[in-house]
Image: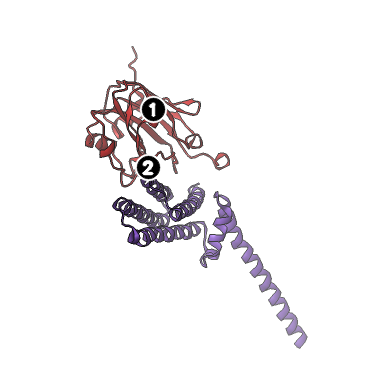
Amino acid sequence: MASSLIFLLLVTLTFSASTLISAKSNTTTIIESTCKTTNYYKFCVSALKSDPRSPTADTKGLASIMVGVGMTNATSTANYIAGNLSATVKDTVLKKVLQDCSEKYALAADSLRLTIQDLDDEAYDYASMHVLAAQDYPNVCRNIFRRVKGLAYPVEIRRREASLRRICGVVSGILDRLVE
Amino acid sequence: MAASVDPLVVGRVIGDVLDMFIPTANMSVYFGPKHITNGCEIKPSTAVNPPKVNISGHSDELYTLVMTDPDAPSPSEPNMREWVHWIVVDIPGGTNPSRGKEILPYMEPRPPVGIHRYILVLFRQNSPVGLMVQQPPSRANFSTRMFAGHFDLGLPVATVYFNAQKEPASRRR
C-alpha cells in the first residue's frame, strides 16, 4: 500500500518536473525566437528575461515590455539632463542646449507611451512610426550639440543615446514581426 | 495626340502634398547607381544614406529641399501625413545639399505597412532662411505646403518621387 503510494508520488513528481522543464523551455523559446528577429539578440534576451512578466507574455506583450524599458531610459535621461547637468552649468548657451535636449528625451518618452497604446490597439503600423520618432529624438539632441561650435557632446548623454537607440531597434524588430 | 499625363498628378503627389506647379529647375537624385524617376521602386536598404542630389541654377540662388512621406503610417490610413524625412535650406544653385544647411537630418524610409511615396521637393528661396528655420518639433503631421508658405518659398521648382515598401525579412539587414 505504502509502496504504491510512494510509486504514485514519484510518478506525479516526475510528471510535474518534466512539465515544468518543458514549460520553461517553451517560454525561453518565445523570447528567443522574438529576439532573433532583432539586431540585438543578446541584449533583447537579457532585457526581457529580467522582467517578471516575460515568461507569460506573447510577442505583443514582449514588445510592450521592451517599450517600457525604453520609456524608463528616455524619462531618466530627460531628468538626468535637466537635473544634474543644468544645475551646475553657468554658460547660457550650454544651458539652452541642455534644456532642449531634455525636452527631446521627454518627447521620446511620449512617443513610446503612444507606442504602448498602439500596441494595445494592435495598430502596429502606428506603433512602428512612433518608435521611429522615439529613436530619432536623441539624434536631434546630438545635432543640437553639433551645431554649437566648440561644444563637446557629453559622454554620458552619448551612452544613453546609444542605449535608447538599441532599445528602439529591438522594438522595431519585434514590430516588424507583428506586422507580418 | 495622346495627352501627356503628368506622373505627379497620377501619383497624387500633386493633390496630396503639392499644388500644381511648372518645373523651372532640374534636380537629379541617385541612391547609389540608381537614378530616381517618378514612381520608381526603391528598396529601403538602398536608401539608408541620403541620396546624391544635384540641382541646377545659379550659384547666387538659394534652394530648399524637403523629403516627405504622405503615406504614414500606411497609405490606406495616412493619419500621420506627412512624415518629413529631410529638410535642407540655403543650398546654392548648381550644387547639392551638402552645401546647404541641414535643418532636419535625413531619416531613411522605413515604411511599416504598404507602399509609401517618398517625395523630394525643391524650392527656390527669395532670400537666405538658414537662421530663421527651426527644426520641426516632430516629424509627423508635417505640411510641406505650410512650410513653404511660412518661409515664403512659393511653388516648387522641381519634384520627384519614388515608392518604397518593407523588404521581406530574408533580404533585410
Image side of residue A134 versus residue A5, left or right? left
Q: Quadrant of residue A4?
A: bottom right
State the SS at label 2.
Answer: loop
Place of residue A158 in the rendered image (x, y in percent of width and height, measured from the top left): 45, 52
Q: Nearer the viewer, residue A8 or A50?
A: A50
Give the number of the disc on residue B96: 1
Who's the residue at 38% across and 27% down the image? B96
Residue A1 seen in this snapshot: no
Furthest residue toward top: B1
**Chain for numbered disc 1:** B
Who's the residue at 66% across and 73% down the image? A16
**B28 up-or-down from A90: above or below:** above
Q: Quadrant of the N terminus of chain B?
A: top left
Q: Amino acid at mark 1?
A: Asn
State the SS at label 1.
Answer: loop
Give the number of the disc on residue B72: 2
| Chain letter, purple | A
| Label 1 to label 2: alpha-carbon separation | 27 Å
Give the number of the disc on residue B138: none
Crowd class of label 2 (few under 14; some 14 to 19; many from 20; radius 10 Å) = many
Furthest residue toward bottom: A2
Q: Amino acid at mark 2?
A: Ala
**Chain for numbered disc 2:** B
Q: Nearer the viewer, residue A4 or B24?
A: B24
Question: Same chain for marks 1 and 2?
Answer: yes
**B4 up-or-down from B51: above or below:** above
Place of residue B71 in the rendered image (x, y in percent of width and height, measured from the top left): 37, 39
Place of residue B40 in the rendered image (x, y in percent of width and height, measured from the top left): 44, 28
| Chain letter, red | B
